[in-house]
Image (tube, rainbow, N blue to C red):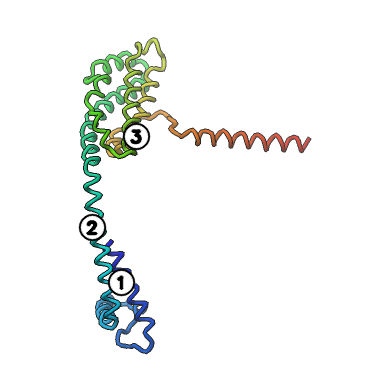
Amino acid sequence: MAIILLSTIVLVLGLAQSASVGDKLCTPTLTELKLPMSFPRWFGCALAMHENLAGGLIGGAGALFAAWLAWQAVMRQINAPADQAYEALQVELEPVVDILNQYWRVVDASIKNRDWRDNGFGLLQSLHPRVGQLRQAITADLANRLDPVRHRQFKKLMESLSWIEQRMDRTHPNNEPLWFENVRTMLSHFNVFLRAFDPVAAKKFRWRKKSRVDHRSMAQHSETSLKISSELGRSNLSQSNEA
């Protein structure tokens, strides 16, 4: 903000100086300055030659800067509860993300080596805390103090955590051939929502194999369908014209 105000003062003084016909005291003009040492000398001279204008500019810039500082202070006070709640949730999410990362490593290994799936499932059952206990480690009431955008992101994140819980509480993988693949899909959903809520925490999943998940809005889904329908319509019309 200070740089913008100072630049405005210099620009206005430069325009005023360039419009002063016959005034050679403050040469070179602002557009002719080449050496860094020339600017302070020109700026001091321009202030002296346009004292009233400079005084008004500096006074106005000072008032705007003070108002900006006051506004920043008010916004910090308003946002303080939301920021504190967000930081608290980040702290509570950290061990949750760590244990999910361990689960994900086992899932990736089990998918890569199908002969190891029984061992992988047994290892998942032995890890603690269990997925069903992870949501209990997060104080969901803190989300009520978040701003609307983060509150929605947190709700989607917790929803995806429940998907993982539901999937991992299902029957033994031998009764469901794609059990590990489905768990990976649920973890991939969680990763997408975590990136939106806490991008730094989501970096812990950067080495994990992700399933392809589609989080496009209904409008975006409809747009794809409309585009395909439009292309088919043009193709049918072209074929009928050729016939």
Q: Nearer the viewer, mark 2 or mark 1?
A: 2
Q: Position of residue 174 (x, y in %)?
A: 37, 11
List the residue tagged with mark 1: 9
List the residue tagged with mark 2: 69
Q: Quadrant of residue 5?
A: bottom left
Amino acid type of the residue tagged 3 in the rendering: Arg
Q: Residue at x 29, y 23 (%)?
A: 103
Amino acid type of the residue tagged 2 in the rendering: Leu
The residues tagged by marks 2 and 3 sit, at their Cα atoms, a distance apart of 30 Å
Number of numbered tags placed on the structure image: 3
Quadrant for the N terminus in the image: bottom left
Q: Nearer the viewer, residue 208 or 224?
A: 224
Q: Is residue 111 above or below residue 195?
A: above
Q: Quadrant of residue 205?
A: top left
Q: Residue at x 24, y 20 (%)?
A: 133
For disc 2, the neighbor class at 10 Å (few under 14, some 14 to 19, many from 20) is few
Q: Position of residue 142 (x, y in %)?
A: 24, 32
